[in-house]
Amino acid sequence: MTTDEMRAKIAAGQGFIAALDQSGGSTPKALKGYGIEEGAYSNDEEMFALIHQMRSRIITSPCFSGEKVIGAILFEKTMDGEVNGKPTPAALIERGIVPFIKIDKGLEEERDGVQLMKPIGGLDELLTRARGLGVFGTKERSVINQANEAGIAQVVGQQFELATQVLRHGLVPIIEPEVNIKSADRAASDAILRDEILRHLDRLPEGEQVMLKLSIPAEAGLFKALTEHPRVLRVVALSGGFSRAEACEQLAKNAGMIASFSRALLSDLRHQQSDEEFDRTLGTAIDEIHAASVA
């Protein structure tokens, strides 16, 4: 796929974006969910080798194709690895799946009800390397825990500042200001966030587009203005702690949003499953998430 073909697929593809981007801090939890306990590895190198094996198994499964999975978000080490002897982004593109890379390095301590992104060292070099490997875009996450207008303004401002740097490298940023779905004032946070994002979108130069990865709003349809904005290529939803059934049910109520699930996609996969059982389990999850994304 050319860059233009990837852009067209993300803009209008009838499917969802798989999140395979667990990083160092969340990898032990992801492996445990997959049936691999911490005693099975003794250092980070072995840990990352095991998570790469899991991701390779997913990517090479017959059901993991561009028909229903239009994109996949990778962790840096996964991007730099290989699947069946090919660089991971190339292996995805061969299957009709558009590759993205997670670029944030984790979260700062909470302040003003939010958690900003930590500084990202060596970002220009990473973006240049990603572009060279055929990666289409990036993903960067911060978190909103309270409906604090000043805090949310800081989150969105930081996100768009980073997005501008990504765009300069010819990549498309997925801006992810996650609203904590367990927050008592979640609905108010959603509304403040929407309005703040709209202000920044209106300032983007003509012809530039970003993507948004947002928590499914408490009020169905709240993000309609974002899904229709000319500076937005696509709006995707995170599962945010919902079960797959809950996430799919809520997503289906929000026309214009598609899924970008991680835990809700992978939760039933186990290291011990036979290839047939693994493929069947993954296929069931893909079918359910795809159906909610095209509802």
Image (tube, rainbow, N blue to C red):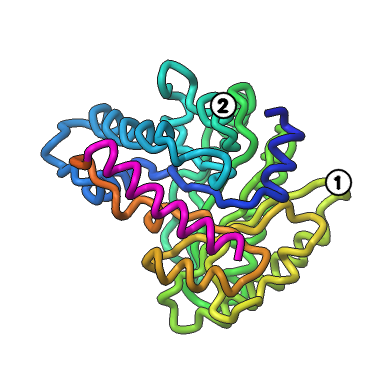
Total numbered badges shown on the rendered structure: 2
Q: Main secondary structure of the magenta part?
A: helix
Q: Which residue is mark 2?
A: 94
- Secondary structure of the residue carrying tag 1 is loop
Q: Which residue reaches farthest right?
A: 206
Secondary structure under tag 2 reads helix
Q: Compared with residue 163, is residue 96 higher up or lower down, i.e. above or below?
A: above
Point out residue 92 in the picture as x, y percentages from the top left corner.
53, 31
Q: Amino acid at mark 2?
A: Glu
Characterize the local packing of mark 1: few (<14), some (14-19) or many (20 or more) Cα atoms within 10 angstroms: few
Q: Residue furthest top?
A: 85
Q: Which residue does the image show at 48% across and 72% down from the upper left?
A: 249
- Residue 150, how many percent across, how many down? 61, 72
37 left or right of 290? left
| Image disc number at residue 207 | 1
Depicted 29 relative to depicted 95: above or below: below
Check the image and report above or below for 250 versus 1: below
Look at label 1 and name its amino acid. Answer: Gly
- Residue 93: horizontal and vertical position, in percent? 58, 29
